[in-house]
Amino acid sequence: MSAREAGEIWGLSEGYVRVHMREGRDHFPPGTIRKFGKQWVVTTRGMESITGRKDPRKGKNNGKK
């Protein structure tokens, strides 16, 4: 996911995510962050690692009963 998507999901600013992607790559588990052209992308596992929080989308019922 992009920095924008990750920020929206975890309730963080896009800038916060970008700074971590650019300057804190050592804090991401191997294979959880990658640059494609000019865009950085991060996996859910990578975001969970740098934020210390599980994916907020997990455990949601998505409107199902």
Image (tube, rainbow, N blue to C red):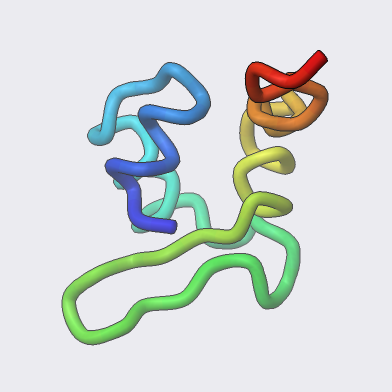
Residue 37 at x, y = what percent? Answer: 21, 85
Q: Quadrant of residue 7?
A: top left
Q: Residue furthest front?
A: 65
Question: Does residue 8 lie above or below 38 as drawn?
Answer: above
Question: Does residue 21 lie above or below 65 as drawn?
Answer: below
- In the drawing, does residue 61 fall left or right of residue 34? right
Instruction: Name the residue located 28 percent from the left edge and 42 percent from the top edge.
Output: 4
Q: Quadrant of residue 49?
A: top right
| Quarter of the image where the N terminus is located | bottom left
- In the drawing, does residue 35 fall left or right of residue 62? left
Instruction: Residue 26: tell me if it is visible.
Output: yes
| Quarter of the image where the C terminus is located | top right
Instruction: Name the residue located 44 percent from the left edge and 40 percent from the top edge.
Output: 6
Question: Does residue 38 lie above or below 57 as drawn?
Answer: below
**Nearer to us in this view, 10 or 61:** 61
- In the drawing, does residue 21 fall left or right of residue 56? left
Q: Residue furthest bottom?
A: 37
Residue 46 at x, y = what percent? Answer: 65, 53
Instruction: Name the residue located 71 percent from the left edge and 39 percent from the top edge.
Output: 48
Q: How many marks?
A: 0
Residue 56 at x, y = what percent? Answer: 66, 24
Instruction: Residue 27: tell me if it is visible.
Output: no
Instruction: Name the residue located 39 percent from the left edge and 53 percent from the top edge.
Output: 23
Residue 61 at x, y = what percent? Answer: 75, 20
**Nearer to us in this view, 24 or 7:** 7
